[in-house]
Every structure is written in structure tokens, then in C-alpha cells.
Image (cartoon, rainbow, N blue to C red):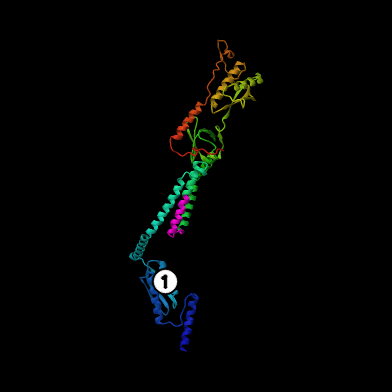
Amino acid sequence: MRHLLLFAVLFCLAAPLAAQDPTTTIDTVATTQQDGAIGDRLQDILGVLGGYDAVTVTVQEGVVTFDGTVTNASDAARLDELANRVAGVVATRNNVFETSDVGARLNPVLDRFQTRMTQAIAFLPLLAVAAVIFALIVWGGFWIARRPQPWNRLAPNPFIAEIFRQILRLGFVVLALVIALDILSATALLGTILGAAGIVGLALGFAVKDTVENFIASIMLSIRQPFQPNDLIEINGDQGKVIRLTSRATILLSNDGNHIHIPNATVFSNRLINYTRNAERRFQFRIDVARDSDLSAARALIEATVQDLPFLLDTPAAQVWIEALEAGGIAMQVTGWIDQRSASLALAQGEAIRKVKRALETAGITIPDNTQAISISRTAPHNTASLPDDDAPIAVDSRHENALDAMIATERHSDDRPDLLRAGGQSE
């Protein structure tokens, strides 16, 4: 009967505790021997875990009380979970707090440091093996990338071939890193490294957007090859002969001898005029004749005069047309075609103007002057028609352009700066 009453009392006390913590098991009989076993078991566990040297455990009627200090607040919170997993524990009182003693807090840190140093020393042979394998793979990749083939055969020009080599080098570095981390059982670190590299790369991409844009434009220009060294081109009003194409800019030499650096993004996205690609080039100038002139005769005379020039091409032939009726006379446009490889456009146009002026004056066709000038002279009027014909031929060869070509050749060989046009490529 007495045992039944004791069982009923314990059942009533245990029911609320079980409701609070379903994982706690409460025996029907609590004895001093059982309390001692619980205390010994917890002390043994704390001893194995370490860090609980200043913690004492007392057990009474299945209630576990922890007293003392620890160096970490999480260690104190861990005690409740640990005690509730021991059979026979009814409840816990956790009186453990985090110590503020400097020595007690530093000793575990020193112990952990010594342990890690010991582990690192023991880890050195494996680390050395991983480093050697990493170096061998990277060396092999770089050796393959240095080979001239197959990269020169696959790429349209040396610049693209170098990009292929850079991609190969990067691939071998990543492969070597994966294998080395796998040897060290640290492949999970690779995702962190690649993620960090991606974030850094994204940030750098925004920071150097213009540089990246110019680099991509350089790749496209080196593939398309819209111009070659010494080509006379015009980009956004800047005219000059091409010195070189770098990974950032196109460098021109103007007719004044000045260097013009144009970003490749501008070159790629804007209108580009290549005057050299076609050997035949047309010059054009305007000349006015008096209103009372025979326009058909003047037109035929000008056309024949220009076409008779020794440097003019037969096809396309010289052409003259009436452009406008001006206040001072009739405006005519004159065109002629030359081979710019052997004749200078500027000199050819100047010589054509000189010859046309002379022919019109000899034929008595007036070239009007829009300005009004009053002059008083006591001498006889000057008869331009009777002037001797001083039409000695004037050289219009391309020596000026050849001089620029010599300057460009000097510039191209004066240093070792990379040139994407050095080996040429398929021109568009």
C-alpha cells in the first residue's frame, strides 16, 4: 500500500515535467545510488569533453545542479541539453557562468594553438605533395600554351592566338587547384574561392567597363581587319595613317606628324573611312566661269584639259558638270581619278586646277571674281591670253605619302609594343 502511494505521488510530480520536456525519462523510484550514478556519468562526460574543469555536478532526487565557470557561454548552455539526455534526470539547475579570468580564458586558446601547430606540421608532407602536383600541372599547361601550334593555325591572327593561350593557362590553373584541393580533402573550399573570384570579377568589370569594352573591340577589329598598317583612314573627323592597333587603342600618324590615339570602342562603333583600300581615288574641285561664257565649250575644255593630264586614269574618265547659278557666275564641279599609289591626291588636284585656270584664260573664258577692286594704272592692260605657256609638267608623285610611310615604319620598329595588325589577317 505504501508503495502504491509513493508511485502515485511520483506520477503526479513527473507528469508536468514530462509535458515540458518529452525526452526526459523519470524513474518511478529515486535512490541515492541512482543520483550518484547520474552525477558520476555526467562528470565522466564533462571530463572527456574538456573545458569543464571548474564545473561541479550534484544530483538530488534526479535533479541535476551545475555550478562553476566556463570560458565560453555556449559551453554553459550545452550543459542542460547534455543532462536531459541522461536517464533518470528529472530537471536541471544551471548555475554555470562565463568566467572573466584572463588566465582561464587564454589557456584554452594557447592549447588550441599548439594543437593546430602540431596538426599543421603533421600536414606538411601532404601539403608538399599537393603543391608539387599543382606546380607540375600548371607548368604543363604553360608549356603547351607556349607552343606555336595548334594555336597559330586555329587563330586568325597572333592576338587571338594569345587569347587562346591565356584561356588554356587559366584552365590548367583551375584544374591544378581542383586536384590539389582534392588531395588535401578541401574541395569544398573551391566553391568559396570561385564565388569570391566571381564577386571580385563583377566588381572589377563595372570599375573597368571602358577598358573591357576597348579590349573586346580590339578582338573584333583584329578579326575583321578593316585596315592595315600605313592605310590612310578617317574616324570621327580624325584622319591619318595607321601605325598600329593595340589592345586598347588605334594609333594614327596625321599628315602633320602627330600621333592620334583613338579608343578601339570608338573605332568599332563609329563610321570608318579607309582611303587606301581602293587604289583609285577621285579628286574634286569647283571653278566658276562668267555668266556670258559658252558653258558647253567651257565644260568641254575643262574636261579635256583634266583628262589630258599624264597622271589621270582613262577609266573612270574626268567629268565636269554645272552645279549652280551663283551671283558672280556659273559654278562647275570638276572631278578626275588617279592611282594614289603613284600620285599624290593633293598635288594632282592642285596641278589640275592650275591647268584648268590656264586653259580658260587662254581661251578667253573669264573666271569671275566676286570681290570689287578699283585700281588706277598708267600702263596698258595686261593681256592674259598672250602670256607665254609655262605649262612645264609638275611632279605629282606620292613622295609625301612615302615619307609618311617611312615615319610609320620607324614608329612600328622603334619599340616592342604589341601590334594586332603585325601579321595581318582576313580583311573585311
Q: Residue furthest left?
A: 103
Return the residue at label 1: 79
Compared to residue 51, the image places residue 263 above or below, namely above
Asked if the magenta segment contains residue 178, the reply would be yes
Q: Picture coordinates of residue 236 (x, y %)?
A: 54, 35
* Front in this rendered view, residue 283 or 341: 341
Q: Residue furthest front?
A: 149
Q: Magenta span covers which residues?
A: 170-188
From this viewpoint, is residue 256 visible?
no
Left or right placement of residue 288 versus residue 72 in this view: right
If the image is split into quadrants, where does the C terminus sit? top right
Q: Picture coordinates of residue 107 (x, y %)?
A: 34, 65
Q: Amino acid at mark 1?
A: Leu
Left or right placement of residue 323 versus residue 400 in this view: right
From this viewpoint, is residue 97 visible?
yes
* Front in this rendered view, residue 415 or 250: 415
Most common secondary structure along the magenta stretch: helix
Write the residue at 41% across / 82% down: 31
Asked if the magenta segment contains residue 414, the reply would be no
